[in-house]
Amino acid sequence: MNIAIDGPAGAGKSTIAKRLAEQLGFLYLDTGAMYRAVALKALRGRIALDSEKDVEEMLRQTHIDVRHEQGVQKVYLDGQDVSEAIRENEVSKAASAVSALKCVRMQMVEAQRRIAAGRDTILDGRDIGTFVLPHADVKFYLTASVQERAKRRCAELQAKGNACVLEDIQKDIAQRDYNDMHRDFAPLRQADDAVVVDSSRMTVDEVAAHMLRIVREKQA
């Protein structure tokens, strides 16, 4: 069984996907982490994020591996654990840019489909239900207001001891939404058969319980 969770940045997709995967005994694949790893390598190599030619050349010498170690997902870039590094705000913005490149999406999508074909899996991202797994058994579109998503992101940064300007985070999220929804190839959009869940006024527990009920109904 495959479950697809799509939606904009900061809607809580990864948090909910992990919770559901644990409750259902499914494999969770954080597809966004794979794009973040590509972005991190491009930033470190000072490669233009909008250059299809340069990024494609970089990809030929790039190995990204997603492993689950003691119940925790780890992302390795060319053999190095970059699980923390890919969560930096600069990398998040860069990921939105490189993920718009067709060469990047095709390579990542091929890997994601291969993983999902082998077992019960939950994938979250921008185009899982529309492009990566169009025949997924259950599709969700998880969203929240820009203001709420910015507050959550700020809280995350502050919890890690980082400074945060709410207005700046809000602008970044709004810009990322626009970029994701207007890219030429596989843009962010709600699949026709997706269940829409607005988490703006819901707790994580409430969202997870609601989505779990829908999955259980499908399993029955």
Image (spheres, grey):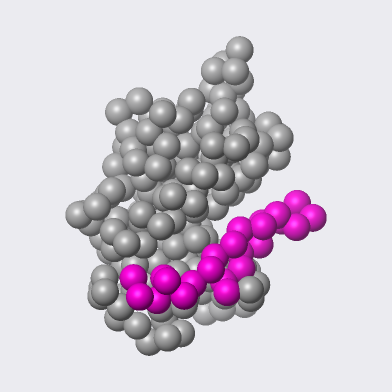
- Which of these two is toward me, 115 or 160? 115
Instruction: Give the answer, above or below, for where 156 lies relative to 11.
Output: below
Q: Which quarter of the picture shows residue 25?
A: top right
| Image point (49%, 52%), residue name | 111
- Residue 103 place in picture, x, y as percent: 32, 62
Q: Which quarter of the picture shows residue 169?
A: bottom left
Instruction: Give the answer, above or below, for where 90 lies relative to 72.
Output: below
Q: Residue furthest top?
A: 220
* Apparent side of residue 68 relative to residue 185 in the rendered image (left or right): right
Q: Does the magenta stretch include residue 59?
A: yes
Q: Which residue range is magenta in the image?
A: 56-78
- Residue 187 place in picture, x, y as percent: 27, 49
| Image point (42%, 50%), residue name | 109
Q: In which quarter of the image is the N terminus?
A: top right
- Which of these two is toward me, 149 or 42? 42
Q: Quadrant of the C terminus?
A: top right
* Apparent side of residue 57 relative to residue 89 in the rendered image (left or right): left
Instruction: Give the answer, above or below, for where 54 lies relative to 38.
Output: below
Instruction: Give the answer, above or below, for where 151 lies relative to 6.
Output: below
| Image point (52%, 79%), residue name | 163
- Residue 44 place in picture, x, y as percent: 46, 85
